[in-house]
Amino acid sequence: MEEGYRMEAVDLALCLAVDVSASVDFDEFGLMIGGLAHAFRQERIARACAAGPRGAVAVALLFWSTRQEVALNWMRVADAAAAAALADAIDATPRLPPPGATALGPGMAAGLALLGRFEAKAERLVLDVSGDGRHNLGRPPGPVRDIGVDAGITINGLAVLNEEPDLLAHYEAEVIGGPGAFAMSCADYTDFTEAMGRKLFREIRGGGLVA
């Protein structure tokens, strides 16, 4: 959020924590970012953002690798126009930080910290983690997950299986946690758009709904 700007209360604060490690090549990054943007252009996603008691959600985008960067600070989405503006902002986001290791634990910690700095009132706090590899550098994800759960944050995962076909099990054991937490998978980045659309709809609607 911009300095001096106080966001109104929302039903959900959602941090999208996206893997930009060396295993994600240029084309795959484009498919992933395009898939996120496409999801927020879907009518049902825009409607879901406005369907709660407060009529809005807030979304931030975090890229993680060996380092972590806030790619897009909090944006409030209360209607189709705001969802389209978020989609445009996601589409225009450059790849930062540079490719490195799959530091999943530190990436999750950065996402939790971003949620902890959210200044407005939110009924739910959700960390949405997506990636294509197991943790291999820094703090392990399991204890980081436990810190988030203790703080009342739900952590969900989308495992892209193109590099590691059994990655979903790692996400289920080490990444997800909290009320209503779930993990999904997609075969590769060409399937990312469809899977992320289903995942976001489920996260935004809440209540353990299956899209």
Image (cartoon, rainbow, N blue to C red):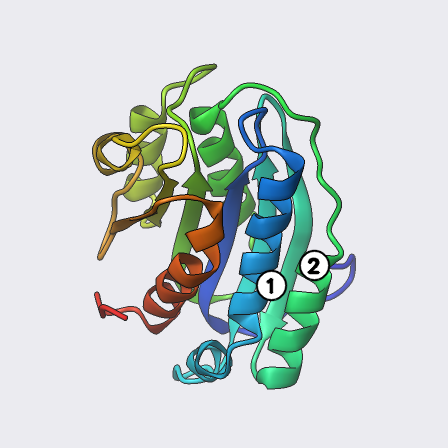
Q: Name the residue: 58% across, 51% down.
A: 31
64 horizontally vs 172: left or right? right
Q: Kindly tell me whether residue 201 is visible in this rendering.
A: yes
Secondary structure beneath dot 1 equals helix
- Residue 56, compared with residue 189, is above or below; it is below
Q: Name the residue: 48% across, 59% down.
A: 193
- Residue 125, compared with residue 107, is above or below; it is below
Label whose residue precedes the other's in the sequence (2 or 1): 1
Question: Residue 144's x, y, as percent?
Answer: 36, 29
**Residue under label 1:** 37
Secondary structure beneath dot 2 equals helix
Query: Along the line of sight, which residue is nearer the eye, 162 or 12?
Result: 162
Q: Quadrant of residue 29?
A: top right
Question: Residue 43's x, y, as percent?
Answer: 50, 83
**Residue under label 2:** 91
Q: Quadrant of residue 210?
A: bottom left
Label 1, residues with CA under 10 Å away: few <14, some 14-19, many ≥20? many
178 horizontally vs 205: left or right? left
Q: Are marks 2 and 1 in contact (CB under 8 Å)?
A: yes
- Residue 112's tag is none
